[in-house]
Amino acid sequence: MNRPLRHIAIFCGLLMLGLLLRANWLQQVDRVELSQHEKNHRVRFERFATPRGDIIVGGKAITGSKETESRDYTFRRTWKEGPMYAPVTGYASQAQGTSLLERTYDSVLSGQDDRFAFRHAKDVLTGQPRRGGSVITTIDPKAQKAGYKGLTDLGARGAVVALEPSTGKVLALVSTPSYDPGVFAGISFKESDRFKKLLDDKAKPLANRPLRETFPPGSTFKILTAAAALEHGVVSDVDAPTKAVSPYPLPLSRNKIGSEAGDGICNKASMKTAMQYSCNNVFLDAAAELGEDRMRETAEKFGFNEDVYADEFGDMLATKSLYPAELDKPGTALTGMGQGSLTSTPMQMAMVTAALANDGKLMQPYIVEELKGPDLSTLETNNPAEMSQAVSPETAKKVQEMMEHTAKEGSAQRALIDGVTVGGKTGTAQRGVNVRDEVPYGWFVSYGKADDGRSVAVAVFIDPTDMDISRSDISGGRLGAPIAKKVMEAVLGK
C-alpha cells in the first residue's frame, strides 16, 4: 500500500473509532439525560400517551386527563378551578412543557417513575395501560379559596401564603392575576398564541408572586427587627421608653424620617408602642444600634440569603430573599423599617411570622404531603423538618406580645377573630427612586391561634398598580388584614 493510501486508511479508521466512542458515550453516559430532555419529542409523547395521575387538594383531585384525537398526544391535561390552583400545580402542556408540581413530580404523574417498574412489567403481561401516581398536597382548599377571592375581589396583583407554624405545611399559595393552564394544554397554534399572550401581558399572570418575586417588605419586617433587638440585648423591656427621637435623623445624613402616627406618639416611644403605631424611628434606631452583622445574622436565621423550597425538589424553589452585605450605617438603619436594599418574597415573610408564632422555631415549608402509586400504595411521605431556632422562645414570646397588642389596640385590628388569639403587623413599602411617583406596596402578616392548639401564619402582599384607589388608601391594614382574617378563619374553622 502506498503512503497516501495508508494515511487515508488510518484517518478513516480514527473517524470510525471516534464514531463508535461517541455512539457508546451517548448510549451509556448521556442516555438518561437525553431520554428525559424537554426537547426530546418522545418524552412529550410518553408524557401524554396515557392519563396523568392527579394532584390532590383536600382529598379531591383538582386535575384530570381528557382523551384527544391526536395520534401522538393521546391525552391532554385538564384542571378544576385552574386559575386558583395554578400557582400550586403549574401547567402540563403538550407544547410548552411543565412547571411547578407538574414538573417536579412529572415522573410520578406520568407513570414513568422507576419505582413503577414492577407494575409496568405486570401491566404489559395483563394488557393494562400504564397509569400515573398521585401527588397529595398540604393545601387547605378553604384557605386557598379565601386568599384567591380576597385578592381577585380587590382587583389587585398580589400574593397570599399561609403556613402551619408547627410543621411548615403550606396551607395556601395564591398569586393574582392568575391563568388557566387548560387554555394552552394542547399542541395547536391557537393554544400557543394564548400562551404567548399570557407571556406578553404586563400584569404578568404567569408569574408566581409568592415564590418567585421579591419586594421591599416595608413595616412587616419590623417584627424581625424587634426579634433581633431583643435577642441581642439592645432592647430588654418592650414597655420602656427608648431614646429614639422622631423624626429620626438618619446616620451620616441630613435626612430625617418621620412616621404616619406623628411625632407626638412616636418620639422616644417604647418598642411595644412603636409596633402598635408602626413608628419608624424606634426600628431605625434599633437596627442602627444592632449594626449590619447582627441584623444580617438574625435575618439569615429566619431564612434570608438562603435557598428556600416549598417542597423537597427543584421547581418549587423560591427566589432568595436578600439581606444585603456591606451596608453602610444609613442603609443598615433603613432595613430596620423594611426599606433600603432589603427584599423578600411573600413566602419568606410568612416564614418569619410562622417562626415567631412557633416560639422561635423555623420549620421547612413543604407543599406535598405524600406521593402515591397507581395502586394507592405510599411511595413517599414528607415529614416536618426544622430549619433553625431563629430566636429563643423568650424573644419570640415578647414579639408575640407586641403583635397581639398591635392586633387588639393598633393598626392590625381588622384581622381580629372572636375566640382566636391573633397577632399582626401592617406594612406599606415604598418602591422606586421617586417614591412620590410610584404607588406603594401593601403588606400584612399575622398569625392566629385557636384554643385547641391549631395555628396558622399568613402573609398577604398587594401591588395596587391596577387598582382604582387613591394613594392615601393604600395600606396593609386596610387592604391586606381582611384577607388574612378570612384565610385564618378558613383554616381554624371560625
Image (tube, rainbow, N blue to C red):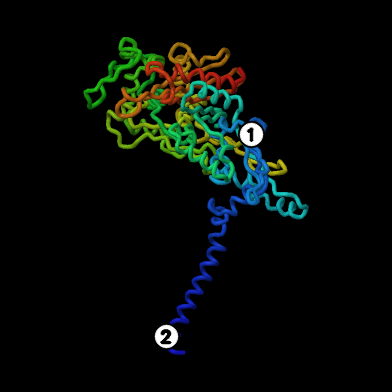
Q: Is residue 167 visible?
A: no
Q: Nearer the viewer, residue 443 or 219?
A: 443
Furthest-bottom residue in view?
A: 1
- Residue displayed at 52% across by 36% down: 310
| Mark 2: secondary structure | helix
- Residue displayed at 53% across by 60% down: 30
Residue 320 appears left or right of 113: left
x and y percentages locating residue 437 in the rendered image: 32, 24
Residue 88 appears left or right of 473: right
Vertical side of 274 occupied by 91: above or below: below
Q: Nearer the viewer, residue 257 or 35?
A: 35
Q: Which residue is mark 2?
A: 4
Q: Quadrant of residue 24?
A: bottom right
At label 2, which amino acid type do we have?
Answer: Pro
Vertical side of 268 occupied by 52: above or below: below
Mark 1 or mark 2, earlier in chain: 2
x and y percentages locating residue 129 in the rendered image: 72, 49
Vertical side of 64 occupied by 359: above or below: above
Furthest-top residue in view?
A: 264
Q: Which residue is mark 1?
A: 62
Q: Quadrant of the C terminus?
A: top right
x and y percentages locating residue 265 in the rendered image: 34, 11
- In the rendered picture of this protein, how many numbered marks are placed on residues? 2
How far apart marks 1 and 2 lie (CA) works out to 71 Å
Determine which of the numbered discs, if any, sits on residue 251 in the image.
none
| Mark 1: secondary structure | loop
- Residue displayed at 76% across by 52% down: 127
Q: Nearer the viewer, residue 255 or 193?
A: 193
